[in-house]
Image (cartoon, helix red, strand yellow):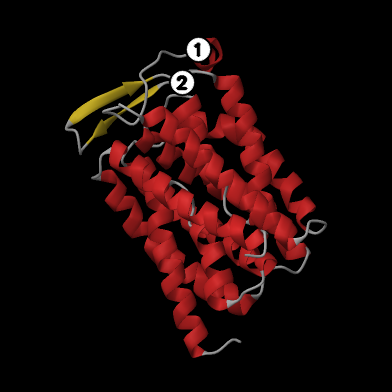
Amino acid sequence: MYNLIFVIDALMISFGSGVLGAMLGLGGGVFMVPLLIFMLNVPLHLAAGASIIAVVATSSAAAATYVKDDIANLRLGMFLELATTVGAVTGAFLTSVTGEATLRMIFGLALLYAAATMYLQMRNMERSWVTKPNDSLANGLHLDGSYYDVARGQQITYGVSHTPLTLGISYIAGVVSGLLGIGGGGIKVPAMNVVGNVPMKVAIATSNFMIGVTAAASALVYMRNGFCDVFITAPVVLGTLAGSFMGARLTYRMKGIVLKKVFMAVLTLLAVRMIASGLGV
């Protein structure tokens, strides 16, 4: 199973996953896990283990770029991470008692729900978010922010709404992350963008910042359970690290509405494939 061709294929898969993951705030695992399963026949638990280790390294690389460009909302990210980290540990412990077909179904349904929610909100919109002021909790915690959008050529100021609900969804994102090794960005980005009404670029950048913390919490459990194979993990980490640098730079120059459309299309395709696989199709 482990030969030069396997290593090259794993590097290519992880590089592409790193680019898309950094661009869309998903950490790369949402693409990498199904590709490792379907293209290289890696068992889901080992694919998730390799992915979760790669996410720790690569989210740090992408987050560094977003923080430098002042797009990531660090205060919002650390607040939501309180719930996400607890969820990640919960999900990682559930992994050892959950069947692979069930995990694939959970993965697919979570992605499909996220894509559908974003589509319903995006119709007839010219921007990637709805402008709303801070709610009372966000106002007390000073979660609002601003950044300069290069693609639009203007300063963007935004608030955060429905903060308690966004926090609850972040816990669910953590559980899914721990179960599947995907970083949880497929749920966190829609939660911040659709529920919290945060601009898409900020949601992506903040998700990348959060993903490393979430992944680190569950990575220890994966290693303890023996789901991290070094011959799979090494090329996956190297490829994803290189791809994440490129993806972060591409995001900086794209409009949020374009990123949102790409996000929805990719999530839908992966969701359908994973659900079909879980059903044995």
41 on left or right of 247:
right
Q: Is residue 231 above or below residue 86?
A: below
Tell me the kind of residue under disc 2.
Answer: Val
Residue 250 lies, in percent from the top left, at 28, 52
Whether pointer 2 and pointer 1 mark residues with C-beta atoms closer than 8 Å, the reply is yes
Q: Mark 2 points at which residue?
A: 160
Label 1: few (<14), some or many (≥20) within 10 Å? some
Q: Which amino acid does label 1 sit on?
A: Asp
x then y, percent, for residue 44? 66, 66
SS for callout 1: loop
Q: Quadrant of the C terminus?
A: bottom right
Q: Which of 116 and 27 is in front in this view?
A: 116
Q: Can residue 1 be seen in this view?
A: yes
Q: Tell me the residue at 59%/51% (across/down).
A: 108
Q: Where is residue 130 in the image (x, y as percent from the top left)?
A: 37, 21
- Residue at position x 38%, y 59% from top? 19
Q: Is residue 52 visible?
A: no
Residue bearing the label numbered 1: 135
Q: What element carries label 2?
A: loop
